[in-house]
Amino acid sequence: MIAPTSYRIRLPISIALISAALIAYQIVIMQILSLAHWFHFAGMVIAVAMLGFGAAGTVLSVFQSRLLKQHRALIPALMTLSGITMTLSVQVSQIRSVRFDSYLLFVESGQWVSLLIQYALFFIPFFLGALALGLAFVQYTHAIGRLYFSNLTGSGIGALMASGFAWYFLPGQLPSVDGLMALFAGLILIDRSNRTMLIPLITLGIFYSGYRIAVPVKLILSEYKSLSHAMDLPSSTITHTRPSPYGLIQVASAEGLRYAPGLSLAFDGEIPVSDVVFVNGEWVGPLLPATRARHFLDFTTSGVAYAFGSRDTVLILHGGTGTEVWHALSKGAGYIDVVEPNGALTDMLRDELAVESDSLFYKPGVRLITMEPRTFAAMGPPDRKYDLIQLPVVGEFGGTAGKYAMREEYALTRESFLQLWSLLDEDGVISVTAWMDYPYKNPLKIAATLAVIAEDREKRSSLAAIRGWGTVTFLLKKSRLAMNEVAQIRAFCDSLYFDPLLLPDLSPEERMVYNVTNDTTFFGYIDDLVYGNRSRLFREYDFHLRPATDDKPYFSQFLRWRSIPRLREFFGMQAVPFFEMGFLIAVVTFVQVTLLALVLIILPLFRRRLKGKGRRWVLLYFGGLGFGYMLLELMLIQRFMLVFGNPVYASALMIGAMLIASGLGSYTSSWYTLSVKNMQIVLMVIMVLLLFYFGVLTGLLNTVTSFPLWLKIIASLLIVGIPAFFMGMPFPLGLRACTFLNRTIVPWAWGINSCCSVISAALAYLLAVQVGFRMVLLLASLSYAISFLACFLLGGRWKVGMKV
């Protein structure tokens, strides 16, 4: 069917708008779940979005003829309903009876039902929008290259817009902002045949979205979030709120908000009450004024870094609100570089929070740098060498319940410590403090990492550590500890009731003078990691202790599957999930969305018993494309966080660049003569590029990281854009081949592709944690190899002339 000229112009614009709305809504749901719960649900959101696309393909396959008869009315109507339900689904998800809490998933079975309801609510807008896109693709398959170009390009622009919107709108407003884009997508396609139905519906949607922008949906945080605890204190109130792509920044004030991590029992002063900054409901730090008295951090194990040697030049990583900066100033540091990746937070500290923080970041000698610490370390020789490099505290008091297991922590990788080593002065020190946890994990992994670094540096360094009742501080000195420095560390411990853990000529009795424990296995583990058979402990310990690397930067991922029976026997089954809850939630999410994909997509498609040629080819060809594209996309997003030193902009830029480049590739494919040979040539190019990246990508990204920003952007766009351009071609070429072979399998092909995308979206994060980024890249290449081999099933030397 040939559409009128005006419709052929309006349809690609409408497709671009609905695609932008859908990808922006996907990012918004990630932000909302990160605020209300954790960031672990990113994979779930992507999978639910692709589940909506797959289910839309199934519905198209089953009801294709009836839907196509009404496509001119249905396409804009579905876009409009998608926009309305974007806001409505978020609003309903906050009702008490359907909310879930991450911390209760492994305690109350009903929480999993609530989680499935959340899946269903967020699934609806994606399903409706995808059904509109699918109808357009199936009806106008002859123009699929151009329409798919609009789809991908719109999605890329939507990813960039989502980051922009997050600066100006609260999380509760953003679904309505995205919904307006979907409503305008439907509005563009109004004509005489459908205006009677659509105008009232779109008008209603615009008024509803506008109301929800003026009166945002109230988002309920988990009661186990740090901010929720703070708001339970007397006279608690939120004094400042700022939306940003980094998360919602809130400043809380209450009578009892104090900060004193692992404070010595010798401290007899008063901890000041302070306002506290939270990002997405998680504690960032207090806003402390200057003090003429001794800083309270002098009475923590981290204060040992100032107990010996001169500390005139200090580098503080993840500086937060500046507590450690005040400490360095109180100890007489003359030059302090503070690296903090949250650009919205640094702006607030310089602006509206300057009074509360006593203009800390305007003090002489204090330089605030907005960047990921690891990127800062990789950008070449610094202006000065540092006497002290201080990393943030690892873990949390009482344990983290494994909530950081799926978070990339590039500052704690082996490569990171090697780069930090190069920034030290000859007598400089790296200091890192960890909360004591049980079973022992964080302190042991820090000890293992620093011990490996000390050996890599040809044993010219010294590794020391002291222990308090709640924290352990490790010191890696670039040169040997002098006898007087060892004496000063011992004196510091004696004065504050701390115990030395690692020192030259340390006797076993010295380790438990003030902080006695019944379980002494911790000391044996430390000795094995630093002095003994480290490899044996790596193999036999119940948790992963090998140092994290840039290829597997998941420092807090400790779970070993083989250890679960023993942990269950010792601690009880209910306790086990709380050791690695984040990773287990990701596993359960993968199982759930895979089952849903099979039920909603695969079973209906196979029950239909499609006749004609191409069914096996469709399954392998489009399945391979779905796996390969999603695996590569998620892997590149995670790798480029290190390059740009900003996870927000890295994600937006990489998603946008990849989708837009793929859109250009799709548009170019519409000019190709359709043949098996051409399809295999494109797939072969993709496979070769991915295998090439498998060998050189890590070194290439390390080089690009040190480039100036403008050159970094250009290089990154080329690195991502070249393979993405070719990856945009196989899907539209395949749909054209479906039309030639058997038109009824077009929606079936789309459903298979979406189903595999659902599975790979949830699987990619698990694979990255277990086998590393390079193996994910190799698996993406193998997925495209499956599509390449599937082309042999087409048989013959058929080809179809050029489609314009």
Image (tube, rainbow, N blue to C red):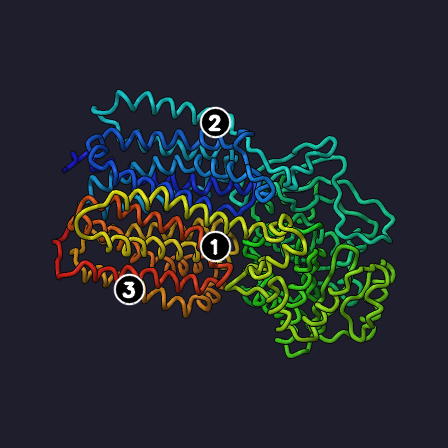
Q: How far separated are the C-alphas under marks 3 and 1?
A: 26 Å
Residue 796 position within the rendered picture, expressed as x and y whole percent measured from the top left: 13, 61
For mark 2, give the secondary structure.
Answer: helix
Q: Is residue 538 above or below residue 331?
A: below
Residue that mark 2 sits on:
212
Please state which of residues 116 and 156 is positioned toward the viewer in this rendering. Answer: 116
- Residue 404 is left or right of residue 799, and the answer is right
Residue 685 numbered tag = 3
Task: Please tell me how crowded label 2 is: few (under 14), some (14-19), or many (20+) other residues with Cα within 10 Å.
Answer: many
Please state which of residues 630 and 207 is positioned toward the viewer in this rendering. Answer: 630
Q: Earlier in the sequence, mark 2 or mark 3?
A: 2
Could you tell me the amino acid type at mark 2? Arg
Q: Residue at x 83, y 72 (%)?
A: 507
Q: Residue at x 85, y 52 (%)?
A: 265
Q: How far separated are the C-alphas under marks 2 and 3?
A: 48 Å
Residue 343 position within the rendered picture, expressed as x and y whole percent measured from the top left: 56, 48
Could you tell me the amino acid type at mark 3? Val
Is the C-beta separation of discs 2 and 3 under 8 Å?
no
- Label 1 vs label 2, nearer the camera: 1
For mark 3, give the secondary structure.
Answer: helix
Q: Earlier in the sequence, mark 1 or mark 2?
A: 2
Residue that mark 1 sits on:
765
Could you tell me the amino acid type at mark 1? Tyr
Q: Is residue 602 above or below residue 794?
A: above
For mark 1, give the secondary structure.
Answer: helix
Is residue 141 visible from the viewing direction of this image?
Answer: yes
Residue 517 position within the rendered picture, expressed as x and y whole percent measured from the top left: 80, 59
